[in-house]
Image (tube, rainbow, N blue to C red):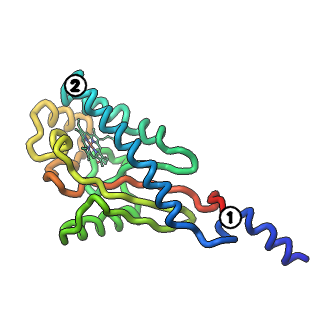
Amino acid sequence: MRLLLICAALPALGWAAAPLDSDRLAAEAASLIPPFQQQLLQTVQQAVASGGPTAAVEACQALAPGIAAQHSQSPWRIGRTALRLRNPANQADAWERQVLEDFARRSQAGEPLAQMRQAAVVAGEFRYMQAIATGEPCLACHGSQIKAPVAALLDQRYPQDQARGFQLGELRGAFTLRRPISEVQP
Ligand code: HEC
């Protein structure tokens, strides 16, 4: 009887009853990235259009964390991380660092960044990362020829900034998503 009760309780725990559907979770994670990415881009582009690149740095600093929070639809949390950071709050944890290093190695070996992604279950969470390439519009703030007023503002706002000197097409960082697996519905 006790065994039966335990078994009956298992489906309520979700993941315990059925193997984790990693493909479904990865697809769910991937679907949250484009709207997040688009809103970040639009925010930067609007700020550039209205006040130039320094205004865009200010907009990015002021709004990027809020945009991430807004796109973190429960139970998912979404953000960005990188090996060379601008905002220290975006620091990679051990798993993220390992994945970023793997992405960098694969990219150096010639694999395109566009399809580069990694999923894993780490410490009770489903984790998902997708590579971010350095595009043309990114160079104004992350390239090697940043205009003097922008560089001065970055010096002031991000005294430990390491996110400069990127080349077009180089790995800039990654989107990173996580959710507890205890809440996964069977
Ligand atoms: C107008 C300047 C500006 C432009 C253009 C810009 N960024 Fe950034 N970027 C920033 C600032 C400022 C931050 C720190 C904001 C934050 O996340 O708190 C940042 C942070 C990031 C981060 C988070 C990791 C970190 O270093 O803190 C990534 C990844 C990133 N940018 C990628 C890109 C990519 C890819 C592009 C082009 C599509 C781009 N950026 C264009 C200013 C810019």
Identity, as a three-letter code, of the amino acid under mark 2: Ala
Please state the horizontal and vertical placement of residue 160, each as a whole percent of the image: 24, 46
Q: Nearer the viewer, residue 70 or 165?
A: 70
- Residue 183, quarter of the rendered image: bottom right
How packed is label 2: few (under 14 Cα within 10 Å), some, or many (20 or more)? Answer: few
Q: Is residue 123 above or below residue 143?
A: below
Across and down, in percent, residue 170 comes to 19, 56
Question: Residue at position x 13%, y 53% from top?
Answer: 167
Give the alpha-carbon distance from disc 2 to disc 1, as whole Å: 48 Å
Q: Nearer the viewer, residue 34 or 134?
A: 34
Query: Judging from the image, what secondary structure is the residue with disc 1 in?
Result: loop
Please tell me how crowded label 1 is: few (under 14), some (14-19), or many (20+) other residues with Cα within 10 Å.
some
Say which element carries label 2: helix
Q: Does residue 117 appear anywhere in the picture?
A: yes
Pointer 1 residue? 14
Q: Is residue 182 left or right of residue 174?
A: right
| Mark nearer the N terminus (2 vs 1) | 1
Which mark is drawn over residue 58? none
Which residue matches tag 2?
A: 49
- The quadrant the C terminus occupies is bottom right
Query: Which residue lies at the image location 84% right of the left edge and 78% below the top edge?
Result: 3
Please state which amino acid type lies under the numbered disc 1. Gly
User: Which quarter of the figure has residue 95?
Assistant: bottom left
Q: Position of residue 48 (x, y in %)?
A: 22, 28
The residue drawn where x is 75% and y is 69% is 10
Q: Is residue 50 toward the left or the right of residue 33 in the image? A: left
Beta carbon at label 1 within 8 Å of ligand 1: no
Residue 122 in sight from this viewpoint? no
